Image: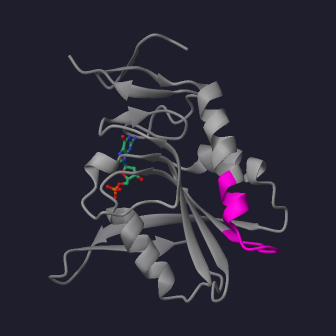
Amino acid sequence: MDKELKVNGLTFVPYLTEDKIHQEVKRVAAEVREALPAGSSPLLLCVLNGAFMFAADFVRELGLSDAKINFVRYSSYDGTSSTGRVKEILGLNEDIEGRDIIIIEDIVDTGLTACKMIEDLKRRKPASIRFVTLLHKPDSTKTGFVPDHVAFSIPPKFIIGYGLDLDGKVRNLRDIYVIKED
Ligand code: 5GP
């Protein structure tokens, strides 16, 4: 693990190693498996882009071959009316009525994205929705939203690596880095 990393003029320091990440991903996958109703074959929704790496490890640890995996994107765009910013889920074309849904997210910060996503999904009448996140910043919450399953609870600092980006870069990093504060 490199000591320091410079990205777009910002300095980052090592925070979570690849080994530690895999250990917690394994733990959280076991937790989810135990929480699922017996015989359930859930629909897993990997939220792009940030969760792609976490999802790849998580679904292998979960080990439910009957579970379908779908990739969704939560897009935001400026609405044409005075309603302002509008967000919607893209890429979810199948019927989810009566299904057990597991949302796989990279990070919950304010919780606004998570709340809106769950609200949208609930309109489609799934049997259940479970929210799994790699990282949670509980002190940043603006919604009081608490994910069902969390690999790491972290302080409200900007982090990168293992799928999380800065300006589209550094998603490839095996470890997670935190911004260096002077
Ligand atoms: P929320 O709606 O919970 O405030 O924000 C969630 C989204 O903000 C995440 O999916 C992610 O794209 C972005 N985000 C929040 N905190 C961080 C961070 O520390 N690092 C990176 N790379 N993205 C973050």
Where is residue 162? Give x, y as percent.
55, 36
The residue depicted at 55 percent of the width and 28 percent of the height is 173
* Region rendered in magenta: 31-43
Residue closest to the eye, 146 or 179: 146
Q: Residue at x 56, y 89 (%)?
A: 125
**Left-right relation of 126 to 156:** right
Residue 155, image x, y percentages: 33, 37
Regarding residue 92, the answer to whether it shows in the image is: no
Residue 144 appearing in the image: yes
Q: Is residue 137 left or right of residue 27?
A: left
Q: For residue 34: magenta?
A: yes
**Farthest top residue in view:** 3
The answer to if 126 sits in the magenta stretch is no
Closer to us: 38 or 178: 38
| Colour logic | one colour
Q: Please, is residue 50 above or below residue 121 in the view?
A: above
x, y percent for residue 90: 50, 72
* Residue at point 19%, 84% (across, down): 81
Instruction: Examine the rendered structure and indicate whether residue 90 appears above or below residue 55.
Output: below
Q: Tell me which residue sits at (45%, 10%) in the image.
A: 3
Q: Position of residue 56 (x, y in %)?
A: 69, 47
Residue 74 location, quadrant: bottom left
Q: Quadrant of the N terminus?
A: top right
Quick one: quadrant of the C terminus?
top left
